[in-house]
Image (cartoon, coloured by chain):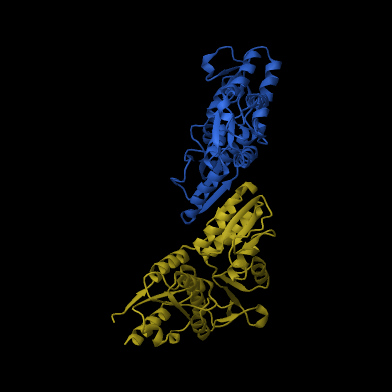
Chain colours: A yellow, B blue
Amino acid sequence: MQKEIVIVKGAGFCFGVKRAIDIAFDIAKKYNSGVFTLGPIIHNPQVVEKLKEMGVFPIENVSEKNDIKTLIIRAHGIPKEKLNQLKLLGYEIIDATCPFVKKAQRIAEKLSSEGYQVIIIGDKEHPEVKGIHSYAGQNAIVINSENIPILNKKIGIIQQTTQPFMKVKEIMKKIINSLNEFEEIRIFNTLCNFTSRRLEATEKVAKNVDLMIVVGGKNSANTNQLASLCKKIGVKTYHIEDPKEIKKNWITPVKKIGITAGASTPDWIIEKVIDRVKRLLN
Amino acid sequence: MQKEIVIVKGAGFCFGVKRAIDIAFDIAKKYNSGVFTLGPIIHNPQVVEKLKEMGVFPIENVSEKNDIKTLIIRAHGIPKEKLNQLKLLGYEIIDATCPFVKKAQRIAEKLSSEGYQVIIIGDKEHPEVKGIHSYAGQNAIVINSENIPILNKKIGIIQQTTQPFMKVKEIMKKIINSLNEFEEIRIFNTLCNFTSRRLEATEKVAKNVDLMIVVGGKNSANTNQLASLCKKIGVKTYHIEDPKEIKKNWITPVKKIGITAGASTPDWIIEKVIDRVKRLLN
């Protein structure tokens, strides 16, 4: 049987992740010691390992270590209070927060200062959202469904940068249904283009293959989103972190295999996945 | 056969129209001559006649008369340039523009000055919309359907005060579908509560009667809206300006008769309509 492998365009590292990793590696080369990332720089164990080899270690809290000189803030960003606290503690802060996330933080702060109730569409447990939320004022709420407890006549809506556009639209339309209860609804588009394009491209491929392999951290929200999307389309889908997880019996019965990857998956892992699939085909 | 007449709650004069008429009658009592309204004060020939009897005449243009001292601006408002021009000509201006319309004008001006492309949902030939449009800047457009030619990444949306909420929602949802093409969508609710409540109350009645009589000027947008709504519901509907138009053969075959009226219909005309229907029932 003739087999075909289709790689999703734009799979893997997004702009913000690439940038954060570049920053981390630059700093790693520059300093000999005392460099830490607050949380893993991205949701990818291999990248975190590489940085460790270069002397840059992830910590969850500054109290863990007492030889901290430089702290790298990862792409997701951190809450405002925490950033201020770290600055006060005298560390050198290298802020690798994704510019799209920074923009969402800035808009949240502006909306709050202008008296809007800020509504963040996203997952309230996600570090990016926790960061944005900290800029959004006391009345801000995070919503993840169409049930919206509205407290104010003036609302400002933003989104976690990696939210799926379809979901955001549905929630927004629900809010529009209650337009008569508001004086003003101000919507900022804070969605990341790279993420939406990757989702769209994945959808196209998933509709035309018999099997989808989704590569990325099991705790990566955007990778999970890719996997959910594929499953929703109805194609057989496996979410893997490591190329070794791929089994021959996944590949044997199918003709067309699609491969996509989350924003925190480096190219070299995608290459390894392709290699392994090719090898199992023979 | 037992017959029933149901009068829609809130039928007739709205807040802005009542206010404009009160202002016009007050001025009529105060001055002996030289008072004119720019256009008919409301879309109701009987009210216009009453004002004429008191010496207040409608004119379309100031060049028509050379004894103008005082000019009353009607509830719909007028374009900004025209207002400035009239002020320069030295007339005393009595601005009876509906406060809801004034609010829409103010928001249009603010949005335009802050760099938004202003989108006005409404009928571009309506005097109110022409007035609001004049405050909305060069890029402003008036839309009446879901096809929206968008020129800017930042748009501000307002509505003609008397637009039906259902229609506004549908257009807004269409815009939300293109959220990814925008940086910001700012929606102000400039709909008039009185109008929406009258539409809602009319809908309720229309669904429960066999015949609807809609009273109001044939050129009154909000009255036409009431008539369209009733027809859409599927109930036999007559749009009349004058109680005398009502025919016995409309009433004879039906059991329940609903009566509603546009924002420019005075109570005494509604009373006459009720009287005539009652008389024809016997």
Q: Is residue B42 visible?
A: yes
User: Which residue reaches farthest left?
Assistant: A2
Quadrant in which the C terminus of chain A is drawn: bottom left
Q: Nearer the viewer, residue B254 or B182?
A: B254
In the image, what residue occupies the spot 34% across and 87% down?
A279
Specify the quadrant of the image occupied by residue B13: top right
Quadrant in which the N terminus of chain A is drawn: bottom left
For residue B223, side relative to residue B150 (left or right): right
- Return the x and y of residue A60 as percentages of the image width and height: 63, 79
Q: Is residue B113 visible?
A: no
Vertical comparison of A176 with B130: above or below: below
Report how many numbered discs are placed on residues in the image. Answer: 0
Vertical comparison of B199 with A125: above or below: above
For residue B185, side relative to residue A140 (left or right): left
Vertical comparison of B238 with A156: above or below: above
- Return the x and y of residue A89 as percentages of the image width and height: 68, 73
In the image, what residue occupies the spot 65% across and 36% down?
B8
Q: Nearer the viewer, residue A91 or A155?
A: A155
For residue B71, side relative to residue B60 (left or right): right
- Return the x and y of residue A219 as percentages of the image width and height: 55, 77
In the image, what residue occupies the spot 39% across and 69% down?
A207
Q: Nearer the viewer, residue B112 or A173?
A: A173
